[in-house]
Amino acid sequence: MSSLAAASASRPNALVYRGPAACDGCPEAVAHLLRTSPSNFSVQFAGPKEDVDITRKSLSQVDVYAQPGGGDLAKTWPAMKPYNHAVRAFVRKGGRYLGFCSGAYLAGRPGFDLLPGKSDTDEESVQPGAQVTDESNTIIQVDWTFSTGPDAGKTEKRWMFLQDGATIQLENGAEDANSTNIKGRFSSNGDVAATLKAFRKGWVGVVGPHPEATKDWYTPYHLHNPDGISLDIGYDFVETTMQCKA
């Protein structure tokens, strides 16, 4: 019996990509977020040098596939392209895709093409009114709308870790669709920072900044989060995606 199949039936299962398309520490941070979330995921890393690779079979045993942060698309997409059909089939049949930073870019084009119609992603740093205008490791303010936990129903201005994060550019009409849940907007210009979107029977959750970032992400760059460092936004992102119904 595989370790995935042996996981408790009461816990959701997740595969987190770990390989050349991910940055150092990013898969581990996403795995920590999932394991410590209210859903208490059973997590296994997947990739070309892991015990499990990303295949239709391995994905059929999990509830969530998570794509962590990594490099730019010119480097990450060639590494991820062999998994394209498996990932798309997984979400199409009812799975959940969670994309963090680079994982958000990969939900667009070039990438897994999981966003509706003409929707796509772009660098927030080049958008009009962007608070951060370069690719440095920094913090950015986001208006986050909580759907779960003690702050459910509230929208709060919160600082988050950012490294050349994406904005999600939804096609006309998509923002108002019942199959769309905009979780966060960049405070300076209202650009979409995080969204959940239906894809056939499944759901795609993408976030441009890093809600999974812990203290060790901030320290090397001498960054201070005015709100303190918390995973509550990350937990809300994960839990809301899990609660979405096709």
Image (spheres, grey):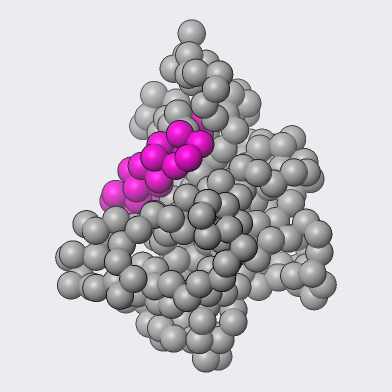
Compared across the picture, whether 141 is left or right of 96 comes to: left
Could you tell me if residue 225 is visible in this image? yes
The verdict on residue 16 being magenta is yes
Where's the C terminus, which quadrant? top right
**Which residue is found at the position 58% from the left and 24% from the top?**
61
Indicate the quadrant where residue 70 lies: bottom left
Could you tell me if residue 84 is visible in this image? no
Q: Is residue 182 above or below residue 69?
A: below
Residue 197 in picture, x, y percent from top left: 70, 56
Residue 15 in picture, x, y percent from top left: 49, 34
The span shown in magenta is 13-40
The verdict on residue 188 being magenta is no
Frontmost residue, 48 versus 206:
206
**Which residue is found at the position 56% from the left and 46% from the top?**
239
**Which residue is found at the position 37% from the left and 29% from the top?**
50
Compared across the picture, whether 164 is left or right of 8 comes to: left
Compared across the picture, whether 200 is left or right of 209 comes to: right
Residue 166 in picture, x, y percent from top left: 51, 69
Frontmost residue, 115 versus 7:
7
Q: Is residue 61 above or below residue 129?
A: above
